[in-house]
Image: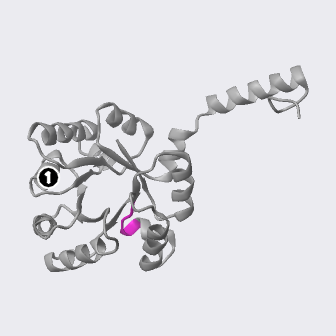
């Protein structure tokens, strides 16, 4: 499974990349706005940090077919490889996904709210599918529908990888990892909840207090 950081906060990306096996970074218009940087600066900062083998995903802003294609080409031209245009699965977006793949561009189909939308994007050649898990939960069993999408892609022999996005809690992440999802893009707050647990902190504190009481020091070996 690929673990992606969903953020334009360079310091957060660096932190989790030092802790975990991070496969890349996703951004979208809201994330870039939240960074407080210009789009050009936010993207340059992330690309300047990522290794060539780590993937970068940036979303188009224009909504018409010609505009989507223009921006998708520009995104994919940012680096020689491992750079993907995120294209929403609107009518214009689905048309653009199909054309982008004809041109050899790398594409993540985003804004997916149903298994059927994701499946159609996969049929058009999308490399990644990003279902909005928590938003899908507002319309029914969002986690279940994402699991359906994983099965639909597998059963039909499609190459697309399902990348869960838009999470509200760790339980949603847990269920999709258990179901064998191909990739997850997670914001720093969800990653922090997965990394940290109060029980672990208490256990470490108990070990340290016991060690100090027994040996009068905080390190394993006496210096």
* Chosen colour scheme: one colour
Which x, y percent locates residue 37? Answer: 50, 76
Label 1: which secondary element = helix
Residue at the image position 31 percent from the left and 65 percent from the top: 81
33 or 161, which lies in front?
Answer: 161
Whole-percent x and y of residue 118? 17, 51
Q: How many marks?
A: 1
For the N terminus, give its image quadrant. top left
| Lateral position of residue 186 relative to residue 189, left or right | left
Q: Does 83 sit left or right of 187 as displayed?
A: left
| Side of 222 where 54 appears, left or right | left
Say above or below: 215 vs 41: above
Q: Position of residue 92 (x, y in %)?
A: 13, 70
Residue under pointer 1: 122
| Percent of width and height locating residue 61 | 29, 74
186 left or right of 211? left
Q: Is residue 170 magenta?
A: no
Query: What is the residue that sits farthest to the top in this orientation?
Result: 214
- Residue at (21, 79) in percent of width and height: 70
Q: For residue 212, what is the image quadrant?
A: top right
Reply above or below: 88 against 131. Answer: below
Front residue of 131 and 123: 123
Image quadrant where residue 43 sits: bottom left
- Mark 1 surroundings within 10 Å by alpha-carbon count, few (fewer than 14), some (14 through 19), many (20 or more): many
- Look at 50% across and 65% down and name the residue there: 49
Look at the image and give the residue range highlighted in magenta: 26-30
Position of the C terminus, as image quadrant, is top right
In the displayed orientation, state which residue is furthest to the right: 216
Observer-nearest of 14 and 191? 14
Magenta span contains residue 27: yes
């Amino acid at each position: 499974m690929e673990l992606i950081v969903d953020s334009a906060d360079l310091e957060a990306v660096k932190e989790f990349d030092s802790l975990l096996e991070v496969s890349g970074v996703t951004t979208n218009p809201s994330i870039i706005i939240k960074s407080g940087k210009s789009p050009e600066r936010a993207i340059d900062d992330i690309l300047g940090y990522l290794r060539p083998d780590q993937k970068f995903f940036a979303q188009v802003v224009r909504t018409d077919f010609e505009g989507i294609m223009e921006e998708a080409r520009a995104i994919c031209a940012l680096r020689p490889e491992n750079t993907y245009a995120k294209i929403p699965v609107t009518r214009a977006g689905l048309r653009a996904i199909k054309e982008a793949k004809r041109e050899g561009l790398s594409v993540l189909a985003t804004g997916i709210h149903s298994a059927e939308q994701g499946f159609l994007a996969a049929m058009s050649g999308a490399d990644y599918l990003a279902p909005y898990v928590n938003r899908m939960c507002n319309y029914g069993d969002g986690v279940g529908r994402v699991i359906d999408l994983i099965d639909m892609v597998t059963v039909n022999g499609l190459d697309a990888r399902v990348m869960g996005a838009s999470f509200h809690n760790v339980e949603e992440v847990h269920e999709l990892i258990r179901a064998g999802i191909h990739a997850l893009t997670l914001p720093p707050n969800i990653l922090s909840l997965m990394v940290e647990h109060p029980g672990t902190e208490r256990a470490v504190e108990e070990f340290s207090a016991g060690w100090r009481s027994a040996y009068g020091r905080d390190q394993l070996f006496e210096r």
